[in-house]
């Protein structure tokens, strides 16, 4: 076991069945990732694998995907992917003023979550 939570020390043990979770909770239409890092790319790999199996259509730029015949209905569900700035210590180091970074980051999160809620 490693002694760090840094992204480069992480490895996939098992993928969650995100499609099942989305099917069980039909109102979910947004997925948020905290930074464009390994976890985001693993999510993209998972979605590409599901796309190859015909379970979804992944948008070309990776910003959203369409579930095919979700929950047995004849309509397809669109799920949007959002990338948030990382709240990690490494992200904070890029700012001279830690408080300003936290304020700006929390305001951005709030704005993105509100937009996602208002425009599912």
Image (tube, rainbow, N blue to C red):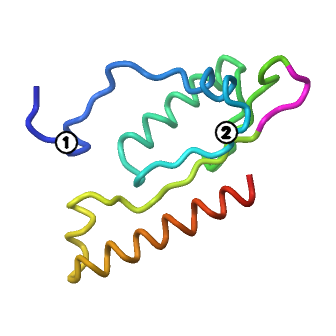
Q: State the image coordinates of residue 20 (x, y, percent, origin top left).
A: 62, 20
**Which residue does the image show at 65% across and 47% down from the upper left?**
80
Residue nearer the viewer, 41 or 92: 92
Q: Which residue is mark 2?
A: 28
- Span highlighted in magenta in the image: 73-77
Q: State the image coordinates of residue 22 (x, y, percent, origin top left).
A: 65, 29
Residue nearer the viewer, 44 or 34: 34
Residue nearer the viewer, 110 or 19: 110
Mark 2: few, some, or many residues within 10 Å (few <14, many ≥20)? some
- Label 1, label 2: how many angstroms apart (C-alpha)? 28 Å
**Which residue does the image show at 35% across and 42% down from the upper left?**
38
Mark whose residue sits in front, 1 or 2:
2
Q: Main secondary structure of the magenta part?
A: loop
Q: Which residue is mark 1?
A: 5
Secondary structure category for the residue under label 1 = loop
Q: What is the tally of numbered marks visible in this picture?
A: 2
């Amino acid at each position: 076991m490693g002694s760090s939570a840094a992204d480069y020390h992480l490895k996939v043990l098992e993928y969650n069945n995100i499609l099942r979770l989305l099917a069980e909770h039909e109102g979910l239409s947004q997925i948020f990732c905290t930074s464009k890092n390994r976890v985001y790319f693993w999510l993209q790999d998972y979605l590409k694998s599901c796309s190859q199996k015909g379970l979804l259509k992944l948008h070309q730029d990776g910003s959203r995907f369409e579930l095919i015949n979700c929950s047995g209905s004849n309509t397809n569900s669109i799920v949007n992917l959002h990338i948030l700035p990382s709240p990690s210590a490494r992200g904070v180091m890029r700012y001279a003023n830690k408080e300003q970074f936290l304020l700006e980051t929390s305001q951005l999160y709030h704005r993105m979550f509100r937009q996602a809620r208002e425009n599912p």
